[in-house]
Image (tube, helix red, strand yellow):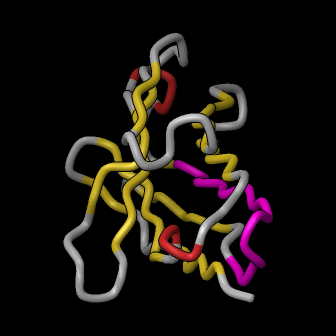
Amino acid sequence: QVQLVESGGGLVQPGGSLRLSCAASGFTFRTYGMSWYRQAPGKERELVAQISSAGGSTNYADSVKGRFTISRDNAKNTLYLQMNSLKPEDTAVYYCRTANFWGQGTQVTVSS
């Protein structure tokens, strides 16, 4: 079955960096577009970034443009989200998604 397992979250100070990973299995990873979403407490889940199946096309939410980079390694069936210049408002649970499948999420907390 389809499995998406996120990792790499944690506590980081404002201005710091984290790299999230999403290990995928149970489907042909290289043929699917992938996305990162996040959900902060009391807020709706929102799209953070998308990447096409081959990685040649990406899109970002305005709030993360220039700070976050989505990428993928199709040989490793893994999706990444490099997050730089983190802000307190980036605090959320981050999820990877493909089609109708979601991972369990990884917590990112930005605080001094």
Q: Which residues are magenta?
A: 10-24
Decide: is 64 above or below 75.
below
Instruction: Give percent across and percent down for residue 103.
Output: 42, 65
Which quadrant of the figure has residue 88? bottom right
Of the 4 image quadrants, the one containing the C terminus is: bottom right
Return the x and y of residue 62 as percentages of the image width and height.
38, 40
Q: Residue at x 66, y 54 (%)?
A: 21
Q: Position of residue 73 (x, y in %)?
A: 68, 30
Q: Is residue 86 shown left or right of residue 107?
A: right
Q: Residue at x 54, y 64 (%)?
A: 5
Q: Is residue 14 magenta?
A: yes
Residue 48 is a magenta residue: no
Q: What residue lies at 76% left-to-right and 77% top-to-bottom?
A: 12
> In the displayed structure, does residue 32 sit left or right of residue 89?
left
Say whether residue 77 is left or right of residue 15.
left
Vertical relation: 38 (above or below) 73: below
